[in-house]
Image (cartoon, rainbow, N blue to C red):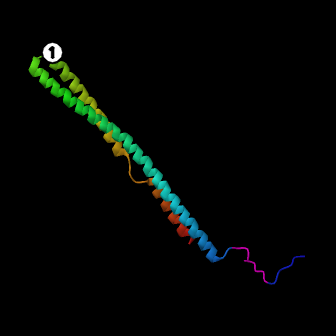
Amino acid sequence: MEQVRANSTPFQDEPSLGELFSDLSASASTLVRQEFELAKVEMTRKANKAVRDSILVIVGGLLGFAALLTLIAAVVLMLAEVMDAWLAALIVGVVLAIVAGILAMVGINKLKEIEPMPRRAMTTLREDKEWLAQQI
Protein backbone atom coordinates (compact mmCIF):
# COMPACT_ATOMS: atom_id res chain seq x y z
CA MET A 1 0.00 0.00 0.00
CA GLU A 2 1.08 3.47 -0.78
CA GLN A 3 1.36 5.94 2.04
CA VAL A 4 1.28 9.69 1.61
CA ARG A 5 2.94 11.90 4.21
CA ALA A 6 0.89 14.65 5.69
CA ASN A 7 3.35 17.41 4.77
CA SER A 8 4.06 16.05 1.28
CA THR A 9 2.91 17.99 -1.82
CA PRO A 10 3.00 16.77 -5.40
CA PHE A 11 5.44 19.62 -6.34
CA GLN A 12 7.95 19.05 -3.54
CA ASP A 13 10.58 17.37 -5.78
CA GLU A 14 10.43 20.09 -8.45
CA PRO A 15 12.63 23.21 -8.17
CA SER A 16 11.02 26.45 -7.08
CA LEU A 17 10.52 29.39 -9.40
CA GLY A 18 13.38 31.21 -7.65
CA GLU A 19 15.70 28.24 -8.22
CA LEU A 20 14.69 28.08 -11.87
CA PHE A 21 15.46 31.77 -12.40
CA SER A 22 18.73 31.39 -10.51
CA ASP A 23 19.73 28.44 -12.74
CA LEU A 24 18.67 30.36 -15.84
CA SER A 25 20.70 33.38 -14.76
CA ALA A 26 23.78 31.25 -14.08
CA SER A 27 23.40 29.43 -17.41
CA ALA A 28 22.94 32.69 -19.30
CA SER A 29 26.00 34.17 -17.61
CA THR A 30 28.10 31.12 -18.50
CA LEU A 31 26.80 31.20 -22.05
CA VAL A 32 27.68 34.88 -22.48
CA ARG A 33 31.20 34.28 -21.11
CA GLN A 34 31.67 31.40 -23.53
CA GLU A 35 30.42 33.49 -26.45
CA PHE A 36 32.89 36.25 -25.61
CA GLU A 37 35.66 33.64 -25.46
CA LEU A 38 34.57 32.40 -28.91
CA ALA A 39 34.66 35.97 -30.24
CA LYS A 40 38.15 36.40 -28.76
CA VAL A 41 39.41 33.19 -30.44
CA GLU A 42 37.82 34.19 -33.75
CA MET A 43 39.38 37.66 -33.63
CA THR A 44 42.80 36.16 -32.78
CA ARG A 45 42.59 33.89 -35.82
CA LYS A 46 41.65 36.81 -38.05
CA ALA A 47 44.48 38.93 -36.65
CA ASN A 48 46.98 36.14 -37.32
CA LYS A 49 45.76 35.88 -40.92
CA ALA A 50 46.07 39.65 -41.31
CA VAL A 51 49.68 39.44 -40.10
CA ARG A 52 50.51 36.68 -42.59
CA ASP A 53 48.92 38.61 -45.46
CA SER A 54 50.64 41.82 -44.35
CA ILE A 55 53.97 40.05 -44.75
CA LEU A 56 53.22 39.72 -48.48
CA VAL A 57 52.64 43.47 -48.67
CA ILE A 58 55.88 44.14 -46.77
CA VAL A 59 57.89 41.79 -49.02
CA GLY A 60 56.33 43.47 -52.05
CA GLY A 61 57.33 46.86 -50.66
CA LEU A 62 60.89 45.72 -49.98
CA LEU A 63 61.21 44.34 -53.50
CA GLY A 64 59.81 47.62 -54.79
CA PHE A 65 62.52 49.46 -52.87
CA ALA A 66 65.14 47.12 -54.33
CA ALA A 67 63.70 47.84 -57.78
CA LEU A 68 64.02 51.54 -57.16
CA LEU A 69 67.65 51.14 -56.13
CA THR A 70 68.34 48.99 -59.18
CA LEU A 71 66.67 51.53 -61.46
CA ILE A 72 68.77 54.25 -59.94
CA ALA A 73 71.88 52.13 -60.51
CA ALA A 74 70.73 51.67 -64.10
CA VAL A 75 70.51 55.41 -64.60
CA VAL A 76 73.97 55.84 -63.11
CA LEU A 77 75.39 53.11 -65.33
CA MET A 78 73.60 54.58 -68.33
CA LEU A 79 75.27 57.88 -67.79
CA ALA A 80 78.64 56.26 -67.10
CA GLU A 81 78.79 53.72 -69.89
CA VAL A 82 76.14 54.71 -72.42
CA MET A 83 74.96 51.17 -73.22
CA ASP A 84 75.56 47.56 -72.21
CA ALA A 85 75.85 47.65 -68.38
CA TRP A 86 72.93 49.95 -67.82
CA LEU A 87 70.68 47.91 -70.08
CA ALA A 88 71.21 44.84 -67.93
CA ALA A 89 70.56 46.82 -64.75
CA LEU A 90 67.43 48.33 -66.28
CA ILE A 91 66.04 44.91 -67.19
CA VAL A 92 66.67 43.61 -63.65
CA GLY A 93 65.04 46.70 -62.17
CA VAL A 94 61.93 46.36 -64.33
CA VAL A 95 61.59 42.67 -63.48
CA LEU A 96 61.93 43.42 -59.74
CA ALA A 97 59.33 46.19 -60.05
CA ILE A 98 56.88 43.81 -61.73
CA VAL A 99 57.42 41.12 -59.07
CA ALA A 100 57.05 43.70 -56.30
CA GLY A 101 53.81 44.97 -57.80
CA ILE A 102 52.38 41.47 -58.09
CA LEU A 103 53.28 40.56 -54.49
CA ALA A 104 51.85 43.81 -53.15
CA MET A 105 48.60 43.37 -55.10
CA VAL A 106 48.19 39.76 -53.91
CA GLY A 107 48.76 40.81 -50.30
CA ILE A 108 46.35 43.74 -50.52
CA ASN A 109 43.65 41.58 -52.11
CA LYS A 110 44.08 38.96 -49.37
CA LEU A 111 43.81 41.66 -46.69
CA LYS A 112 40.56 42.90 -48.28
CA GLU A 113 39.10 39.36 -47.97
CA ILE A 114 39.41 39.40 -44.17
CA GLU A 115 36.17 40.31 -42.48
CA PRO A 116 36.93 41.88 -39.08
CA MET A 117 33.50 41.07 -37.58
CA PRO A 118 33.40 37.78 -35.61
CA ARG A 119 30.40 36.43 -37.57
CA ARG A 120 30.11 33.04 -35.84
CA ALA A 121 30.17 34.58 -32.39
CA MET A 122 27.60 37.21 -33.40
CA THR A 123 25.31 34.54 -34.86
CA THR A 124 25.47 32.37 -31.76
CA LEU A 125 24.92 35.41 -29.52
CA ARG A 126 21.73 36.18 -31.47
CA GLU A 127 20.64 32.55 -31.12
CA ASP A 128 21.38 32.65 -27.40
CA LYS A 129 19.37 35.85 -27.05
CA GLU A 130 16.42 34.20 -28.79
CA TRP A 131 16.75 31.09 -26.64
CA LEU A 132 16.90 33.17 -23.47
CA ALA A 133 13.83 35.15 -24.55
CA GLN A 134 11.94 31.88 -25.03
CA GLN A 135 12.97 30.65 -21.59
CA ILE A 136 11.55 33.74 -19.89
> Is 25 colored magenta in this rendering?
no
Residue 3: where, in percent of width, then height?
86, 78
What amino acid is at disc 1?
A: Asp
Q: Work out which residue is located at the far bottom of the displayed protein and give it.
A: 6
Q: Residue at x 45, y 58 (%)?
A: 122
The answer to which image quadrant residue 17 occupies is bottom right
Residue 27 as seen in the image, left or right of residue 64: right
Q: Residue at x 21, y 26 (%)?
A: 93
Q: Is residue 111 above or below residue 91?
A: below
Residue 124 as seen in the image, left or right of residue 75: right
To which residue does mark 1 refer? 84
- Magenta part of the protein: which range? 7-14
Residue 33: where, in percent of width, then height?
51, 61
Residue 131 visible, this angle? no
Residue 97: where, in percent of width, then height?
23, 30
**Element type where label 1 sits in the image:** helix
Mainly helix, strand or loop, the magenta region?
loop
